[in-house]
Image (cartoon, coloured by chain):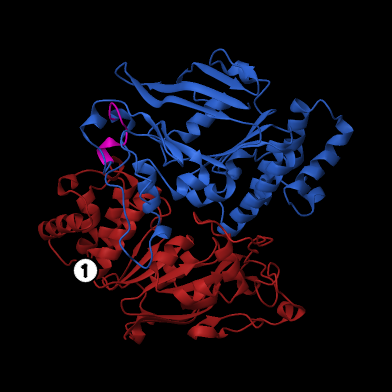
Amino acid sequence: MILSVKNLNVSFPAENGQCLKAISNLSFELKEGETLGMVGESGCGKSLTNLCLMGLWPTQAIIEFDELIILGKKIPRPDPKLWQDIRGSKVSMIFQDPMSALNPTMRVRKQIFEVFRFHRNDINKDQYEDEAIQLLNDVGIPDPQKRLDAYPYELSGGMAQRIMIAMALASKPQLLIADEPTTALDVTIQDQILTVLRELIEKYRMALILVTHDLGVVFQNTENIQIMYAGEIIERGKTKDVIHHPSHPYTDGLLKSLPESQKNQAKLYSIPGVVPDIHDRPPFCQFAPRCPKAQDLCDKEFPIWHKNNFSTAYCHFPMDQDNK
Amino acid sequence: MMTVLKVENLAKHYPIKGWGKKQQSVTALKDISFEINEGEIVALVGESGCGKSTLAKVLMKLTPATSGRIELFSEHDYQDEKTPRSTDIQMVFQDPYFSLNPRKKLWELIADPLLIQKKASKEDAKIRALELMERVGLRTNMADRYPHMISGGQRQRIGIARALILEPRVLICDEPISALDVSIQSQIINLLLELRQQFSLTLLFITHDLTVVRYLAEKVIVMYLGEIVEWGDKEALFNNPSHPYTKALLEASPSIFGQKKHSPLTGELPSPVNPPSGCAFHPRCPIAQESCRQKRPLLREGDDKRLIRCDLV
């Protein structure tokens, strides 16, 4: 087991002494070599979840969990210090915007060597250069020797993201968290980066958490998926099953609203309303106010996990998959 | 069918450094020719830096063209006009967070074009603005709010209402949905299609999302490094792309129905400051030959009445 999270709660103190709950009772597990897609709209807590897994949450956040085991290490309390020997070495992260994640004042060489210096005791200083060139080769950077001397501003967005991936892999992590790694890039470049990422995941047998809002990207790159809505996981299962046979009404609505699912200007489905504001979230089912299948029960009791042949959904009245 | 917008050999250069005879410039657009018929939805696709937004700006006269002709409703004098013809052609911008003046109330934002064009008094303008708010699906009791008080989807509705208040016949949408969440995107697309009926609009839709193009467009223009590489009916282009770049673009686009097995396009968009010789696409093209390096292909007629800039297919 690479990762096990039980009942992760994250809240932020508000002005009037209250707490705003950003993530509630989030639990999931990740096996070795598993690729997991995390999907949701902006503000649903997918990035925050991953920052918590990395021990990088914002300082004002209040973190609670029943259990957190990362790579066999049990973390007893939410103290960023306890992440020191995991973060960046066994668990690496790739961020959305490579241009703001790289240090603009340092050459690529120094930034990669830094990772070696902190996280790689198995190689000595003379080997750094070769190892770095090998890494840049792996991520498909042409002329790696020359690129080591480049500053980030000299790189294109795609190249910078490749450098980020190389840096994330420099420590030979067992778990890679990619937070919208291709959102800032063009489709052809996105295609290149995702292909490289897929190959490397296979080569190094890493587990991957891919955070994105693009269902097409998840479909092609992950084996399992979990859909998040307003700080909760609302559906999980095999990616193929969830995308082709969604159970939760939110997942269903999201998929139906993709232009891909309709042809030639037939009216697109759209989920009514907007994502509830964090100040004003419904007490029970978060999706109930927008849900076409909601009944009285949804406003009175917490949803329960329903399992069908395809996926598991956190809903009282999941979509009927038998009729499809 | 009436031609609404006709563009011939449009070019746009931006100066980058030097002056006088040493003036260097970057070619943002070259040799752009196309026409749009009344009521059509034309999608303009391509990667960032290919000149899509520059083209929109030139068509809107937000920046002057270096050479070439633009005809609006077959009127030749649109060419020489310095200021935009805001009553005929309007634009919705990409980012609803930056394109709205944060110090104006929502109704003022919508009514502004009317007031600037002196088409209505302030009272009448407000009434029209409230009417339009309703038509784009906003409650009129929001009229006195400011942009920071509403969501991204609502802001984009304001952007659309503002573009429509002068009742233009052509609407250019520059990536109107790419800053929005998936579930909001479909609302805005539906709205645009509805309004297109009501206002009998001709739409030029700029986007990089091919799933939206497949759904929405009737004709597609594919651009690469400032020039048109393929232009034709959507069905023809999507079912049977001719130009290697169009093909690559379609293969690269992620889909919930799975991607065809393919090898991704190598390399990146070259810098327009120092464009490749011959065909602009040859350094990345999987079928490029020696001749592509030397001779720049011309836009020629291909299958299904499409125009294509490639000599090999």
- Image coordinates for residue B299, horizontal then vertical, percent: 57, 83
Pointer 1 indicates a residue of which chain? B
- Packing grade of label 1 (10 A; few <14, some 14-19, many >=20) is few
Residue A64, x across and y down, in percent: 47, 17
Q: Colour of chain A?
A: blue
Residue B86 as seen in the image, left or right of residue B70: left
Magenta extent = A282-290
Dominant secondary structure of the magenta stretch?
loop
Identify residue for label 1.
B198
Residue A235 drawn above or below residue A240? above
Numbered label tally = 1
Residue B15 position (above or below residue A197)? below
Residue type for callout 1: Gln
Residue B66 visible in the displayed image: no
Name the one closer to the observer, B112 or B300.
Answer: B300
Tell me which corner region of the image, top left, top right, bottom left or bottom right, holds residue A15: top left
For the colour red, the matching chain is B
- B280 shown above or below B173: below
Task: Give how far across and how far down residue B183 sits, in percent.
Answer: 36, 48
Determine the image quadrant of residue B103. top left
Question: Is residue B79 a member of the stretch shown in magenta?
Answer: no
Q: Is residue A285 magenta?
A: yes
Q: Is residue A187 visible?
A: yes
In screen coordinates, is A225 left or right of A140?
left
Residue B261 % position (x, y): 63, 60
